[in-house]
Image: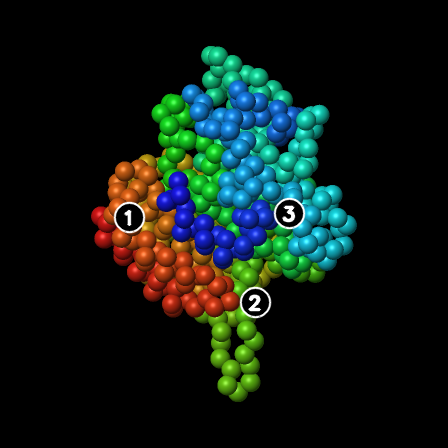
Amino acid sequence: MGGRVSGRLSFVCGVLGAAFLGCALFFFALTSGAERAVASSASATSSYTHVGVASCAGSTCHGRSEPTGKVVRQDEILQWQSASSRTGAHSRAFAVLATPRGQAIASKLGIGSATSAGECLGCHADPAFAGKGPRWHVEDGVGCESCHGGAQQWLSSHYAVGQTHAANVARGLYPLEQPRARAEKCLDCHFGSDKPGQFVSHRIMAAGHPRVAFEVDLFSALQQHHDEDADYIRRKGRTNNVQLWAVGQASAVSRATTLFANPRLGTDGIFPEIYFFDCHTCHRQIVDGPNGKANWVPNPGRPIPSGMPAFNDENMIMLSAAARIAAPGMAAKFDADSKAFHAAMARDRGAAVAAARRLGASAGALADAMGRASLGRGETFAIIDSISSSAITARFTDYEGSAQAVMAIDTLLNALVRQGHVSQDRARNARGAIDRAYKAVGNSNAYRPAEFRAALGQAAASIRALK
């Protein structure tokens, strides 16, 4: 586990903000049948009372001090509430609201104490929208049921002899083993949703909240409390990390366009909601006068006028790279819809919303396709080559997309190792180049597109050599 995430852990802490893990300041108008099924499942799991972390903490359940259980580890509560490790970040989510930084953000926003503000509790505590049992406590932070669903109906049945995972899901257990379902659940807090307290607006970030970022395979690895052993695979299937990554990228594009099209969330006064835009298209050094020169780089994926803020397309870029390999018959339409969306942003909100819905539908269809695709050794190497191809690297003009690219090639290499296609010893040969790529996005204020592209190309070449 440590080998999988060590490089990415330092990147997450250093690049997305040291408070991101240590303090846990974490960050469907679509048409596909699978997405409607996920939405239906999410709706069902959110309709049950949350009974609280203490209901899961017995020594015969998940409260052991050592991982000695025959079926599951049974020390999951200990891992979840670890005071300092990355696996304890969710349990620390509420506590950080009372820190000076949390209170300073709340003060700037004028929302009273962060520990009681709805704008904060939607993600820094268990969002038990359907009801709270007597053992539910806000101080528990992001507890078991935040991710696994309200346990009112499945708490007893999920450990009963003869019960199946499918039966428990029918009673409200959230199906996190399904890539699309997991991505949608994580996105609620790690990207945003239209539910109460689950949207980090530009105003909240301006008050001091870290920039929101999301990559479902990385975040899953950092928070994993279970062992994917033979029993797990028999009950829930083996995780395909490449598939999880690809579905996560598609789900993020789908979520972004859906939220943008929401009239309540997509605007802020006379302005569009700036949260949706790439930070560095605005936050750049101002250089003018007779010796001034442009400090932006043209992006072939964004047909917009110079000087116009660009919609944050980090997930669009990654999805485009993946679609060329995993769903080539759909890739051209997605790219066309992506460009059309950017172009519509230069016209008016009505055109942009219509284009966002078309792009969201394309992304949703790709999420379904990725969920069905067989992504093995050949496809994984091909996606890495796609990310580092000239067609894609030309779109790495801003920090956010480049950060996603580094996480992607690291995720894909780790998937090759986990699936037995590349040995851990051989993978170490590529780590130095990947670390240099991480360094190229180590400081958002010192980001240089040309330097990053070179570093990414070297990292991809080092992985290609493992074939």
Q: What kind of residue is marked 3?
A: Val
Label 2: few (<14), some (14–19) or many (≥20) C-alpha neighbours in 10 Å: few
Q: Are marks 3 and 2 in contact (CB under 8 Å)?
A: no
Label 1: few (<14), some (14–19) or many (≥20) C-alpha neighbours in 10 Å: some
Using the image as rendered, state which of residue 66 and residue 460 is in the foreground: 66
- Work out how far the residue at label 3 is from the one at label 1, CA to CA, in angstroms: 37 Å
Q: Earlier in the sequence, mark 1 or mark 2?
A: 2
Residue 409: x and y, percent? 36, 51
Classify mark 1: helix, strand or loop.
helix
For marks 3 and 1, give the one nearer the viewer. Answer: 3
Q: Are marks 3 and 1 in contact (CB under 8 Å)?
A: no
Q: Can you tell which mark lies on residue 96?
A: 3
- Identify the residue position indicated by label 2 in the image: 283
Q: Quadrant of residue 50?
A: top right
Q: Quadrant of the N terminus?
A: top left
Residue 440: x and y, percent? 41, 63
Give the residue at x 56% y 64%. 309
Question: Could you tell whether 451 is left or right of 420 in the image?
Answer: right
Give the residue at x 29% y 50%. 428
Give the residue at x 61% y 29%. 53
User: Residue reaching furthest top?
Assistant: 162
- Work out how far the residue at label 1 is from the one at label 2, CA to CA, in angstroms: 37 Å
- Work out how far the residue at label 3 is from the one at label 2, CA to CA, in angstroms: 27 Å
Q: Earlier in the sequence, mark 3 or mark 2?
A: 3
In the rendered image, the vertical position of residue 448 relative to residue 52, given as above or below: below
Using the image as rendered, state which of residue 392 and residue 345 is in the foreground: 392
Using the image as rendered, state which of residue 264 and residue 341 is in the foreground: 264
Question: Could you tell whether 326 is left or right of 363 in the image?
Answer: left
Classify mark 3: helix, strand or loop.
helix
